[in-house]
Image (cartoon, helix red, strand yellow):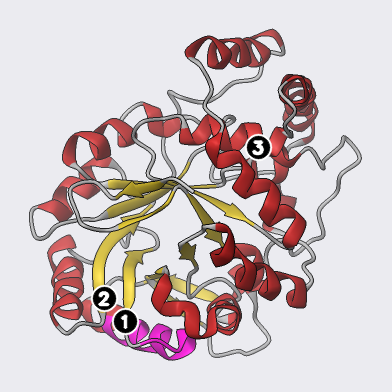
Amino acid sequence: MEQRKFGNTDLQSSAVGFGTWEMGTTQYGDIDIKQAVRAVEMAVDHGITLFDTAEVYGPYTSEELLARGLGERRKDIVLVTKVGFTYHDDADRQGNAAVAGRDASADSVTQHTEACLRRLRSDYVDLMLIHWPDHKTPHEETVGALESLKQAGKIRHYGVSNYNVEMMAACQSHGTLTANQVGYHMFDRRMEAEVLPYCQREGIGYMAYGSLGFGLLTGAMSPETEFVDWDWRSSGKAFGLPLFEKDHFEKELRVVERLRAFAADHGRSVAQLAIAWLLGHEAVTVGLVGMRNEQELLENVAAADWRLTASEREEMDTFFNDEEVPTYIDAEQAT
């Protein structure tokens, strides 16, 4: 597996990262927990060295299951988690309903980091991210807390998630960001306008989530696909874009069918094509992919060595144009 460096830092990891949002079990469709934990156990053997989780996935469940799967191999990998929310005390609330609000104050970041370490059964986190911007707390205060945690040895690097260029620049005035984690895939290219160029220019690693279009690019969906009420995609929206609204969804699936045929001509799957396309952007450090079982793990790992040519990428773009499916490069980023 290709290893990539996070900007100007000494942190590096596999180009494909293991995303664990689905392991939260409360926001992302059905998942077999035993198979998911087994996939974590096997991932290191297949060259994956970065595992990304977050306190809010569940909440808490994903971190706990990831710790179970990693066991003693935690020391061999780059462990990433995210804080920045507060939660309701009601234990019956799960998923997004459990979130009370955003909070990146110094006290909150410090306390929630300590809790993450306990769930992850680790003395430190390799990379701690602020999950979403807290518009009430000054960036100086948030970065100051992260710097203190770094000095204490509880985190080795820090960064942000879902921050725009202005927010990253404000943070950089008070410390050094190692990474920004933001959504990026074929159907959502908003980050190409400003965020990706900024990260590349400033030496900030870029972690792309939603690499498979939140399921669109797996090839497993059809016009009859429906989401259960507690699946976040049931709203039809994906981080501000109408990807799963009926009219948009059906047109997107026509693009997916053309992508599937293109991939098949190369002896690959559409999911592998999506990963190869993502990793082909020179500013992308890691593409995060959910892997629910051994089959998905092996398929995703095999995509890392596929290099698309410029003409192949241009041909793929014609599929979107022909079907009149937007890629939203000029749309506003969700923060």
Q: Quadrant of residue 78?
A: bottom left
Distance from Cα at disc 2 to Cα at disc 1: 5 Å
Q: Earlier in the sequence, mark 3 or mark 1?
A: 1
Q: Which residue type does callout 3 highlight?
A: Gln
Per the image, the residue denoted by label 1 is 124
Q: Position of residue 33 (x, y in %)?
A: 74, 76
Task: Say whether marks 2 and 1 touch (CB < 8 Å).
Answer: yes
17 with respect to 177 (left or right): right
Per the image, the residue denoted by label 3 is 272
Distance from Cα at disc 3 to Cα at disc 1: 33 Å
Q: Residues within 10 Å of mark 3 (few under 14, many from 20)?
A: many
Q: Position of residue 158 (x, y in %)?
A: 26, 64
328 with respect to 212 (left or right): left
Q: Earlier in the sequence, mark 2 or mark 1?
A: 1
**Is 319 or 329 nearer to us in this picture?**
319
Task: Say whether marks 3 and 1 touch (CB < 8 Å).
Answer: no
Instruction: Examine the residues drawn in magenta and state their main secondary structure.
Output: helix
Q: Residue at x 16, y 46 (%)?
A: 169
Q: Quadrant of residue 202?
A: top left
Q: Is residue 114 magenta?
A: yes
Q: Of helix, strand and loop, which one carries label 2?
A: strand
Q: Which residue type does callout 1 highlight?
A: Tyr
Residues in magenta? Answer: 110-122
Q: Residue at x 55, y 59 (%)?
A: 19
Q: Is residue 79 above or below residue 264?
A: below
**Is 179 or 70 nearer to us in this picture?**
70
31 with respect to 104 (left or right): right
Q: Is residue 21 magenta?
A: no
Q: Is residue 175 above or below residue 213?
A: below
